[in-house]
Amino acid sequence: MHDFLFKKGELYCEDVPIRAIAQKVGTPFYVYSHHTIVDHFTKIQKAFAQIDPIICFAMKSNSNLAVLKTLVDLGAGFDIVSVGELKKALLVKADPKKIVFASVGKTEEEIATAMKAGILFFNVESLPELAEINRIAKRLRKKPKVAIRVNPDVSAVTHEKITTGTLRKKFGIDLKTTRGIFKNRRKYPNLEFSGLHIHIGSQIVTKEPFINAIQKLIEFIERLRHDGTQLEYLDIGGGLGIIYKDEKPQTAQDFANAVLPYLEKAGLKVVLEPGRFIVGNAGIFVTRVLYLKDNGLKKFLIVDGGMNDLIRPALYDAYHEIVPVKETKALRKKMDVVGPICESGDFFAHDRELPVLKKGDLLAIMSAGAYGYVMSSNYNIRGRVPEIFVKGNQFEISKPRESFKDLIRGERIPTFLN
Ligand code: LLP
């Protein structure tokens, strides 16, 4: 479900024509739908209602303040990976007791700041990190909760670059080492060992990888119980896939039906970390046609957005549906949709059949709400594009377009060159 639909021949976000936004803010831009976000969050909440989990939105997927505020108002917490994300979460008044912090490379400053903020727990990804958190806790006279992020060594059928749960990847701690940590917990007197965490990958459309991982985890928890360890939390990460093209992903309810029996058996408080499922289809990227070029062999539709704005096609060969914002009966031809960046990887689609559009026409790149704006850069000295937020028939610029002044803020020529 999403709220980007055609009405009277043109694309709308809820009750706002995309054309009206383009007129006001220029192109390119991202636009997010309040209603889609609410709908997706609520679907997860309802599907898991019987165990009342803490739903920590993975804000690495989209950290726009309007998106975060919408989710906080629905009772969401956050899965964070940096002090920057922590600060944004606190800015929208997230409850620190609903914030979990994962990342293989947390710095001393990040750990201390999160500890002072009183987050729910740290998801610990290595032995030296555990020692570091223990040391900082002693210095700050705190006793923070930690969950060990285990690497269950299961493969998830997804893109190689977004698989995380196998031992060939940098994430988490293997089961043997984890068992040792619990046995030697006295070595870390300033920590409260309260949970286990897994996150096996992203854009996973079937239930089996989740079941495999959770099953492994439950067996492991049994072994820990046998060793005398009682846990409080089980954080099963994110990873639910969405529809980009013709995927038939599990629904939130399918997912819940598959994993609830295991989770209920474990009897621990469950934390979920969905990102893409909530925001992926709640946002689109809108760009404008600059030129149509035909070199005899291929046609290129050159648009004003580039890989610096939306890098998923370049980085993962990701498929995003592309639709003209105004329906047209123009002849359809195969073409590459490309941006202005000086890289061959700067494309949104290869050999895609699209109507032959003309200069100034608007195109929507769909399902761009997750890992879109957040992965954008200033490559080729291009300002980040604005983020627009829609609710019903209202829209506002949530984050303005970056100006040249923004781009060179603080930059200067060293005195010794003058
Ligand atoms: N929890 C942890 C610890 C994670 O590392 C991630 C995503 C999530 C939760 C949320 O996963 P989701 O529900 O969104 O699948 N840039 C890539 C995706 C990278 C995912 C990183 N971790 C892409 O554009 O496909």
Image (tube, rainbow, N blue to C red):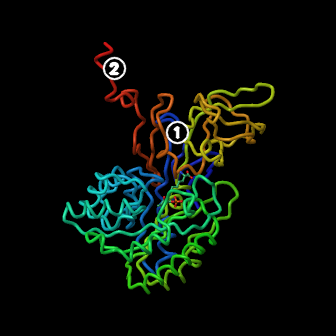
Residue farthest to the right, as pictured: 296
Between residues 317 and 277, which one lies in front from this camera angle? 317
**Residue appearing at x 53%, y 80% in the figure:** 260
Q: CA distance from mark 1 to mark 2?
A: 28 Å
User: How many labels sit on residues?
Assistant: 2
**Residue pointed to by mark 1:** 309
Percent across and percent down for residue 335 are: 74, 36
Q: Residue at x 52, y 52 (%)?
A: 370
Mark 1 neighbour density, 10 Å: few (under 14) some (14–19) many (20 or more): many
Asked if the beta carbon under badge 1 is closer than 8 A to the nearest atom of ligand 1, the reply is: no
The image quarter in which residue 17 lies: top right
Q: As shown in the figure, which amino acid type bears the numbered disc 2?
A: Ile
Q: Depth check: give the residue in front, 243 or 172.
A: 172
In x, y percent, where is residue 135? 26, 61
Q: Label 1 sits on what residue type?
A: Asp
Q: Does dot 2 land on a helix, a strand or a loop?
A: loop
- Mark 2 lies on residue: 413
Q: Badge 2 local density, few (<14 within 10 Å), some, or many (20+)?
A: few
Q: Position of residue 104 (x, y in %)?
A: 43, 56
In the rendered view, tell whether residue 305 sits above or below residue 70: above
Q: Nearer the viewer, residue 248 or 224?
A: 224
Picture quarter with the N terminus: bottom right
For the residue pair 257 and 302, the one nearer the viewer reads as 257
Residue furthest top as drawn: 418
Quarter of the picture holding the C terminus: top left
Residue 175, image x and y in percent?
50, 71
